[in-house]
Amino acid sequence: MGTQVWKEPFGSNNGELTISGIAVSKLAKRYGTPLYVYDLSVVQKKYEMIKEALPGFDVFYSPKANPNLHIMKRLTSLGAGLEIASGGELFLARKAGVSVGDVVFVGPGKTDSELREAMIAGIYAIVVESAGELRRIEAIADELQKDVAVALRINTMQTAESAPERMVGGPSKFGFDEESVVSAVNSVPLKRTRIIGIHVYAASGVLDVGELLSHFKRTLELAVRLSKEIGFALRFIDFGGGFGVPYTEEQNELDLKAYAAAVQEIVAEESKRTDLSGVRLAFELGRYLVAESGVYLTRVVDVKQSRGKTFIITDGGINHFMRPAFVNAKHHAVIATDLDGTGTVATVGGPLCTPIDVLVQELDVGSVEPGDLVAVFDTGAYGYSMSMLYFLSHSLPAEVVIDRGLPVLARRRGGLEDALIHQVNY
Ligand SMILES: Cc1ncc(COP(=O)(O)O)c(C=O)c1O
């Protein structure tokens, strides 16, 4: 394995993976395995890159990608807002200390009590997903005697063809269909609810600048058109985001500079026709900001041969990092304690009793032994919180952040009692 496949803060020393100069075996010894490690310098760098490229835009971090409070606090302290998607995320947003004026609440199936909490908190806007939800928002605002700002989530007709996960373009549980949004909204009498703009989240994991740009242009034009057709003062456009990261060597990084330059041109062009000076323009990003900060570290428990194939069995698997099985994602991985080893193609699987518990299908390794460490890269997004942590009653893994080069425990390792969480009357 060459050492050139990763970037700062990842490196190597004597054939071992380092993170901000710290050997992973040290982290594993101190905090145990399986272990998530997030380097906050990566999160900060990605946020600053976006802000530098798109200075006129607000960035809302989507904690669904990683709700670790160290990450949320770092981003909000740098100026990011939050795009929350549940009452639990509102609770975390409060813990992160974000200003409520920088919080939007997006997502289908918001309950009355979640909507009420958000309105009492006074968040910037609720992104409304349907006429039914709009009606409930108006009723709760009336009950609270409080005005509320909403943005209309639109299910546009076009989608991002290349994206692995698409949220618009067909029949969808997300948002109002573009072609009928005007009549749907007009069917709901609004007194306390003020429409301030629109929201379109097209797809996740997009690396194609052209597709992102057509989405941007379409959303801007749609916002202007709908503000006229429905009759609201345009104050907010949330362009979603879905910026991808390259998970494999075949994928290229998103060309942020080219994207940002073209975005500025599109905005300048529209500004000739529409006064956008008082309009808050925003992206909501998860994966792009945090995926590359994270490494999932597991320890090799067994190495075995089966009918000509080598299997490396580790102490953690898809119970903690489900993406490989869930979305068939391929992640770059290494034997972190033997980076230079080569010559054998092995399958790396975790301890679960299912054949889908495979972290890496084919990994070129040397002479791996129990006790070695496996590192799976780009696991800072949709890792811990998207996995089936209780399956087979393994203890919950710990999370460590590297903050200015120093490791800090961010989430304690669980124990046997994890298997009992909230079980009662047995
Ligand atoms: C509405 C919405 N916003 C933001 C995100 C975050 O997406 P990503 O992590 O790809 O940036 C998602 C992801 O599914 C989403 O559905």
Image (cartoon, rainbow, N blue to C red):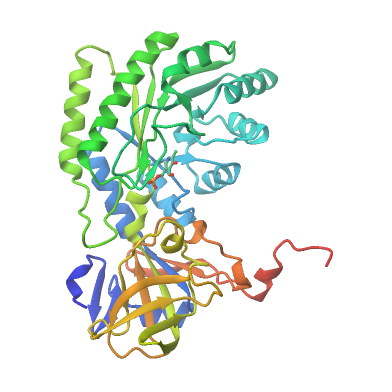
Q: Quadrant of residue 338?
A: bottom left
Give the residue drawn at x 40%, y 33%: 168
Q: Position of residue 184 (x, y in %)?
A: 52, 16
Spot occupied by residue 255 in the image (x, y as percentages of width and height): 18, 46
On the question of residue 356 being in view, the answer is: yes
Could you tell me how many numbered marks the image carries?
0
Q: Is residue 183 left or right of residue 279?
A: right
Report the front residue among 295 and 408.
295
**Is residue 120 toward the left or the right of residue 224 in the image?**
right
At horizontal 52% and vertical 10% (from top left) the residue drawn is: 186
Residue 339 sits above or below residue 160 on the image:
below
Tell me if 293 is positioned left or right of 416 in this view.
left
Q: Quadrant of residue 314?
A: bottom left
Q: Nearer the viewer, residue 396 or 305?
A: 305
**Rendered-image quadrant of the C terminus:** bottom right
**Vertical order, 332 against 416 (above or below):** above
**Residue 14 appears in the picture as rendered:** no
Outermost residue to the right: 425
Question: Which quarter of the figure is the N terminus placed in?
Answer: bottom left
In the figure, residue 135 lies in which quadrant? Answer: top right
Q: Residue at x 27, y 87 (%)?
A: 366
User: Observer-nearest residue: 74 or 214?
Assistant: 214
The answer to which of 353 and 423 lies nearer the viewer is 353
Residue 179, given in percent of the width and then of the height, sits at 42, 18
Task: Relative to 111, say whether 307 is above or below.
Answer: below
Q: In terms of image quarters, where does ligand 1 lie?
A: top left
